[in-house]
Image (spheres, helix red, strand yellow):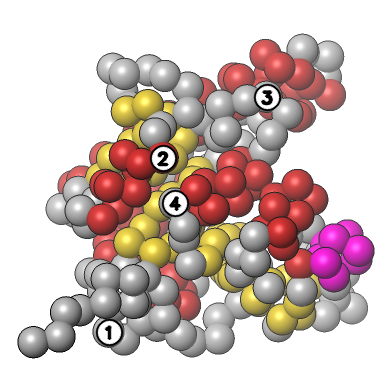
Amino acid sequence: MAELDSSAPPPGTIYRRILLKLSGEALMGNSGYGIDPAVVHAIAEEVRDVRAFGVEVAIVIGGGNIFRGVAASARGMDRSSADYMGMLATVINGMALQDALEKLGVFTRLMSAIEMREVAEPYIRRRAVRHLEKGRLVILAAGTGNPYFTTDTAAALRAMEIKADAILKATQVDGIYTADPHTDATAIKIDSISHIDVLTRGLKVMDATAISLCMDNHMPIRVFDLRQRGNIVRIVRGEKIGSAVG
């Protein structure tokens, strides 16, 4: 009997392993600050549905709902200190998401680039990959563990390290636009674009370091609206949701 190809996507999907990039702001809902448990629960349900297909999932999460290092630096705080505070905020968000996922029966591991063994495993690439292979969802917190790097860059880096098939970038709009559609009525949606065009046109998809890293390593990115229920499942099943970069 022929062996199953473990590198092939599960039946009915186009990805074997994805990295989902969530902003911290995605967790606060309409409250303007902090964590909305109902929103976290809804995100956890979305991710559970993806895992049910057999797709391996890693999540990189931001901390902007609690603390933004760049904003604090602009107001006079030392940049390194501000960035480390932002990294700690991502761990708080990771713990909240882990709790919601485990309440839904999803086996989850929280890994931190800054060592804090009481609440998270230290990030070790091979261990993260092993968790994924065993069917566990992995939340990757604390960015890269270094100041001056965003969680966008952390998402790109971790996607390369774990050999993800794609980065799914969750946003508050339904794809990439030529301008901010909330403020510019002439903004046009872009269904597909190359990494280099994102950089040369200055589109705010991810920061330039993250886009460059993805371009150099041929990592596709799918930008989509997280608020539309079922979008993550639709993407992994091959539907043309949002905008594609690659």
Query: Which amino acid is tagged 3?
Result: Pro
Instruction: Find residue 80 and report its horizontal and vertical position in percent.
Output: 71, 17
Q: Nearer the viewer, mark 1 or mark 4?
A: 4
The Cα atoms of the two marked residues, 2 and 1, are separated by 27 Å
To which residue does mark 2 refer?
Answer: 125
Q: Quadrant of residue 56?
A: bottom left
Q: Quadrant of residue 75?
A: top right
Residue in view at x 48 percent, y 28 percent = 113
To which residue does mark 1 refer?
Answer: 11
Q: Nearer the viewer, mark 4 or mark 3?
A: 4
Q: Earlier in the sequence, mark 1 or mark 4?
A: 1
In the image, residue 60 above or below residue 233? above
To which residue does mark 3 refer?
Answer: 147
Tell me the element at label 1.
loop
**In this orientation, does residue 174 appear?**
no
Which stretch appears magenta? 196-203
To which residue does mark 4 refer?
Answer: 162
The Cα atoms of the two marked residues, 3 and 2, are separated by 20 Å
Q: Quadrant of residue 174?
A: bottom right
**In this orientation, does residue 14 appear?**
yes
Query: Which amino acid is tagged 2?
Result: Arg
- Which label is found at residue 29? none
Query: Disc 3 vs disc 1: Cβ atoms closer than 8 Å?
Result: no
Residue in view at x 71 percent, y 59 percent = 216
